[in-house]
């Protein structure tokens, strides 16, 4: 199950998310996966009322769904060469949001999904400003690194959700 939503938030909310995620709270780490990955993380957003209450309610309303709750909320950041490795997520569902206001197809940074049980790519979801992606956490996937033509930080906001 992969659902893609374009123009997910109003412009003011997109701008506020980006403003909050460009504060100096980023750290470089390997994430929580067993394979070594080095990319940027902004952890602990479940402790910030804006993300855990206000934005969470907006997401539930936009998706017309009530969740049991969330396990964690954080942001990933990738620069050129910082490619993720295939993994499964925790929780039941993952909600990803792309807050950057501009993105060029040549900058890559897509979300890659695989067929069950093999290494064949089944679906590619392009990184696109103000796009949200909801998918089952048990889907084998990774985020591709942005190309060398992009000099910034590819940001995605992640909610690890529990079904009701």
Image (tube, helix red, strand yellow):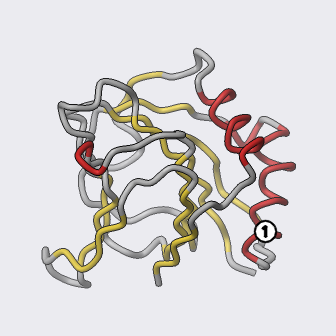
Q: Nearer the viewer, residue 92 or 78?
A: 78
- Left or right: residue 118 versus residue 77 is left
Q: How many marks?
A: 1
Residue plotted at (67% across, 27% down) = 19
- Left or right: residue 79 versus residue 95 is left
What is the quadrant of the C terminus in the image?
bottom right
- Residue 68, x across and y down, in percent: 77, 72
Residue closest to the far top: 24
Identify the secondary structure beneath mark 1: helix
Q: Quarter-wise, where is residue 60 in the image?
A: bottom right
Q: Quarter-wise, where is residue 120 in the image?
A: bottom left
Vertical side of 153 occupied by 45: above or below: below
Q: Which residue is mark 1?
A: 60
- Residue 91, x across and y down, in percent: 57, 66
Residue plotted at (58% across, 42% down) = 74
Q: Nearer the viewer, residue 64 or 102?
A: 102
Q: Quarter-wise, where is residue 25 in the image?
A: top right
- Left or right: residue 83 versus residue 22 is left
- Residue 39, x across and y down, in percent: 34, 32
Vertical side of 144 occupied by 155: above or below: above
Residue closest to the far left: 119
Vertical side of 84 occupied by 81: above or below: above
**What crowding class fits label 1: few (fewer than 14 Cα within 10 Å), some (14-19), or many (20 or more)?**
few
- Left or right: residue 134 versus residue 53 is left
- Residue 138, x across and y down, in percent: 42, 75
Residue plotted at (51% across, 72% down) = 4
């Amino acid at each position: 199950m992969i659902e893609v939503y374009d123009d997910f938030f109003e412009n003011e909310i997109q701008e506020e998310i980006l403003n909050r995620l460009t504060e100096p709270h980023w750290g470089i780490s390997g994430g929580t996966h067993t394979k070594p990955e080095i990319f940027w993380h902004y952890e602990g957003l479940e402790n910030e009322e804006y993300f855990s209450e206000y934005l969470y309610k907006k997401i539930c309303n936009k998706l017309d769904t009530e969740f049991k709750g969330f396990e964690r909320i954080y942001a990933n950041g990738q620069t050129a060469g910082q490619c993720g490795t295939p993994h499964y997520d925790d929780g039941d569902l993952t909600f990803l949001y792309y807050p950057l206001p501009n993105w060029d197809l040549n900058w890559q940074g897509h979300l890659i999904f695989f067929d069950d049980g093999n290494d064949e790519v089944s679906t590619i979801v392009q990184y696109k400003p103000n796009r949200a992606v909801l998918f089952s956490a048990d889907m084998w996937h990774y985020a591709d690194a942005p190309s060398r033509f992009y000099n910034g930080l590819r940001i995605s906001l992640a909610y690890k959700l529990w079904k009701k």
